[in-house]
Amino acid sequence: MRIPAMIAAELRRLTATRMSVIALIALLLVPVLYGGLYLWANQDPYGQFSEIPVALVSDDEGVPASDGQEAVDYGDQVADQLLEGRAFDWQLLSATDASAALSDGAVDFVVTLPSDFSDALTSVAGDSPRQAQISLETNDANNYLASTIGTQAVEQIRRSVAQLVGKEAATRLLTAISDIRGKLVEAADGATQLADGTATALSGAQQLASGADALATGTGTLATGAQQAASGAQQVSEGARQVSDGAQQVAAGDQELAGYADRAGAAATAIADAVPQARADIAAELAAQGLDPAQIARVLAALDPLGQRITDGNATVQSAVAKVDQLAAGASQVAAGASQVADGAALLAAGTAQLSSGADAAASGASQLRDGSASLASGLGTLDTGAGTLRDGLESGVDAIPDSSADLRAAQAQTISDPVEVESSKVAAAGDYGAGLAPFFAALAGWIGIYALFLIVKPISRRAVTALHSPFRITLAGWLTPAVLGGLQMAGLFGVLALALGFGFANPLGTLGIMVLASFTYAAIILALNVWLGSVGQFMGLVLMVLQLVTAGGTFPWQTLPAPLAALHHVLPMGYVVDAMRQLMYGGDIARVGGDVVILLTWLLGALVLAAIGVTRQTHFRTLRDLQPSLIG
């Protein structure tokens, strides 16, 4: 009997009755139903999060306006953003209603913004900064993954709030820095003016020091001269006093002389005034004596020159009296002046004494002024240097703080609040969650399909074993029937993935080829188990499926497995099927596919060789196990 005939005979057996046909079709659809339905249900679960009911409790009381700060209510802002974003089916509830809804399963988790939410967020500007809290309440009795999703959602809310608050804080900080820069510019201008002023002051101080030195020298000379002047003034005062005393004595003598002169003048005047009367009396006496007028005239003519001399003498006496009176008056004035001179000399002596004392004090003060002005010049030199350093430092500070506009500060605040932008690129892209799981579930569905087929397909025909003595042909015929049917299963599953679910394939023919090769390999492995262990081998196929289910790395990376299971990942074939499908389906590294194919072919050939050895044993020997009934059905 040839191999095609054996395959045909097995197919006729499988389709002999209507029920057998229905059973065969049902088993052929197992991979399609398993892989297709599962991937359909999980094609894009993340895109359906908006249907997950979530309670949102916003008890935030906000922060009122104070000290020039606007009122804020971050709780309302966050609640509005969440409701508008519709990442979930947010339901704004009170704390009591939300707790009841979570217990009843009406919502999957509860997010609460406490009453001090805004107050805590703004506390960073005060003396007691603290973190704001977002409360997450879950109920694993509703859905464990919903709790995990809630944790991720709250983390996203936390990042959004941190970005919001960080942007506002950065805006205030940058505005304050801009204001500081403005003040530094003003301070730098003031420092420049100060430096210029101190330079001028230093020059003036140096001139002052020079003048103070000259002043100290001059006041020293003045003090010496003032002392000499005080001594001379004292001598002048003493001499003036002596002159005043003498002038007083002269004035007294002149006054006495003036009295004598006045009396002499009066006498002379009386004599002169008596001359006419005396002439008349002489004339009368002469007339009485009997002299004639001529004689009388001759006598009077002889006497008239004497009278004239008396009159002239009176004039001379009166002139002398007037001069004596003038001399007495002048002597009195001289005496008064001398007295005034004496008083002035005394005052001069006192003033020069004071001048001498003041000059000494001035000399001492000038010396102090000289020393102080020198210290002032030195200090102003230090101040000038410091002012220059201050000016340069302020200008450097201004240069170190970049000038910014309101738009630039807004952009800077945005960058500070969210400094890292994740730019993700994919060497190979799956598309969505369902496409990401497709390689794993397609590989698993292929094993389940082959496993199910061996429930009705006979691994080795007893008739063929009896009739033929070619183990290889018997093994090949026993493998080809489930392998071909498995290939049909994979083709049907590929059609569902590509057409019904709309998954994209970077290399569709290569993907289908790997799926078919995987089915062929699975058929060889389960065939070998059945040949060697019979129905127990069928059960071992189930155990092997479970091992590959956890070691293939279809969901979490295989590196997360415990060490013994991670070691099995490198041995069992399903992990290589998953890897090859990923590379071909997503457009990954085709070179890796070659290595995966080599491993699968090794498993395929090794299983066929092992099955052939088992068939050889059956054709030549009978063991007690062959005669015993199967432990499984």
Image (cartoon, rainbow, N blue to C red):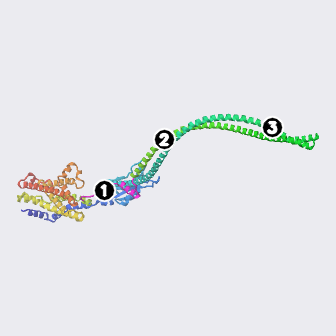
- Residue annotated with mark 1: 422
Q: Amino acid at mark 2?
A: Ala
The span picked out in magenta is: 401-428
Residue 142 visible in the displayed image: no
Residue 530 in the image: state x and y as whole percent: 13, 55
Residue 381 in the image: state x and y as whole percent: 45, 44
Determine whether the residue tagged by mark 3 lies in a helix, strand or loop.
helix
Q: Amino acid at mark 1?
A: Val
**Rendered image quadrant of residue 422:** bottom left
Q: CA distance from mark 1 to mark 2?
A: 68 Å
Q: Please tell me the numbered disc located at residue 116.
A: none
339, 73: nearer the viewer: 339
Q: Residues within 10 Å of mark 1 (few under 14, many from 20)?
A: few
- Residue annotated with mark 2: 374
Sequence-wise first label, 3 or 2: 3
Q: Residues within 10 Å of mark 3 (few under 14, many from 20)?
A: some
Does 518 appear in magenta? no
Instruction: Report the quarter where the C terminus lies.
Output: bottom left
Residue 573 in the image: state x and y as whole percent: 17, 55
Q: CA distance from mark 3 to mark 2?
A: 80 Å
The nearer-to-camera label among 1 and 2 is: 2
Q: Residue at x 72, y 35 (%)?
A: 250
Q: Amino acid at mark 3?
A: Ala
**Rendered image quadrant of residue 626:** bottom left
> In this picture, is 628 found above or below 235?
below
The number of callouts visible is: 3
- Residue annotated with mark 3: 264
Instruction: Report the quarter where the N terminus lies.
Output: bottom left
